[in-house]
Amino acid sequence: MNRLRKCLVWDLDNTLWDGVLLEEPVSVKPEVVDVIKELDSRGILNSIASRGDERLSLSNLEKNNLKELFLVPQINWQPKSQSILKISSELNISLDAIAFIDDDEFELEQISYMLPDVLTFHAEDAKNLPTYPDFSPLEITAEAKERRKLYQAEMQRKTAEENFKSRKEFLISCRMKLTIRPMKEDDITRVLELMTRTHQLNTTGIILTKDEIKNIYQQGADGKNIYVADLEDRFGWYGIVGVAMCEADKVLWRLNYLAISCRVMGRGIEKAILITLVEKAIQNDFKSIEAEFIDTGKNKMMRGLYQMSGFVGEKNESNSDRIKFYAVKNKLARVPEWVQVL
């Protein structure tokens, strides 16, 4: 099964435009521009890893009204593998969610060797990329259509943070407002997207089909309910950044699944969502409150979330990757003070 790529990193010379900018006048390839705009509309980010003069290259992109389409472009004389690592870090996107396109076979081979998780394409394939499963989300959400702008707003946050003495002061200044509510029918596509795209901040790795999500929405299948978390701050709208799947009987409340967008990592949003859900379960007088965790190899932060939020774990004897956490009510953490839950 092909994994959807979240970011496509472009070379410039003889890839985005014909010719070598430092040696001759170049012309942007219109068919490549069409591809970039199409991927952008699908919520797939575009970036640049290219050797050359940064000032001259950015000037040429701006002249062709293309500069704003690329996030954290890396134009320098360093190995392109280093540039891709920087892009991965700046955008907080794992390497196995990144693809790279270049006209030079040597560069492609080098990236495949140095960064084997990065998918590579030859520049000749550019016009066909929108037809590949790697760049074809099943459906396109409102968040996907705005994804580049959401990342650009995030960059504004990072710039603003530099003016504060502490991280806490900055987070308080953001005036974050979090809404946690039952999933609506219009949210189903975004819920599916979060399930398929979120790997680090994901408690169990479960991926439901759209029909399974619809069934839970329509019938509350097996006592399950799905909640979504919507976030905004003074910089703008984040969209739906979290999804939780719960089930309950008369005395037991269980969190089967929690996934949080990596865009809000490190802001306490995952703790705010978890604690808010648990507090509601306590208010509804459930005697036992549990949460499932399955180690996927990439989600250890979510195990830490439970441990730091007042849960104790019990391993499954037959499956060492599965842990059942129990909430200790008098030891529960609090919602971070900089998050207002509406």
Image (tube, rainbow, N blue to C red):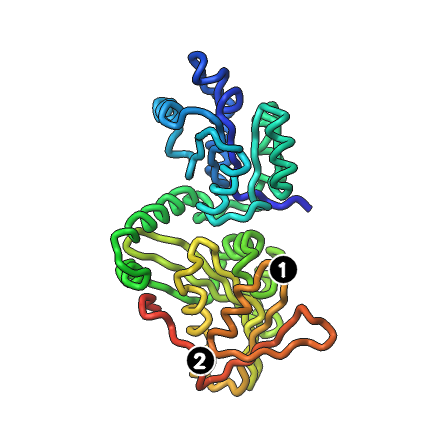
Looking at the image, the residue that sits furthest to the right is 318
Query: Which residue is under mark 1?
Result: 297
Q: Is residue 342 visible?
A: no
Residue 132, percent across and down? 62, 36
- The kind of secondary structure element at disc 1 is loop
Q: Quadrant of the C terminus?
A: bottom left
Query: Which residue is under mark 2?
Result: 332
The residue that appears at 41% across and 44% down in the rendered structure is 146
Q: Is residue 311 visible?
A: yes
Give the tally of numbered discs. 2
Between 80 and 138, the residue placed more toward the observer is 80
Residue 93, percent across and down? 51, 48
Q: Is residue 53 above or below residue 258?
A: above
Near mark 2 (Cα within 10 A), the count class, few <14, some 14-19 or many ≥20, is: some
- Residue type of the residue flagged with mark 1: Gly
In the visual, does 98 lie left or right of 154? right
Near mark 1 (Cα within 10 A), the count class, few <14, some 14-19 or many ≥20, is: few
Quadrant in the picture for residue 216: bottom right
Residue 166, percent across and down? 29, 61
The residue that appears at 56% across and 34% down in the rendered structure is 100
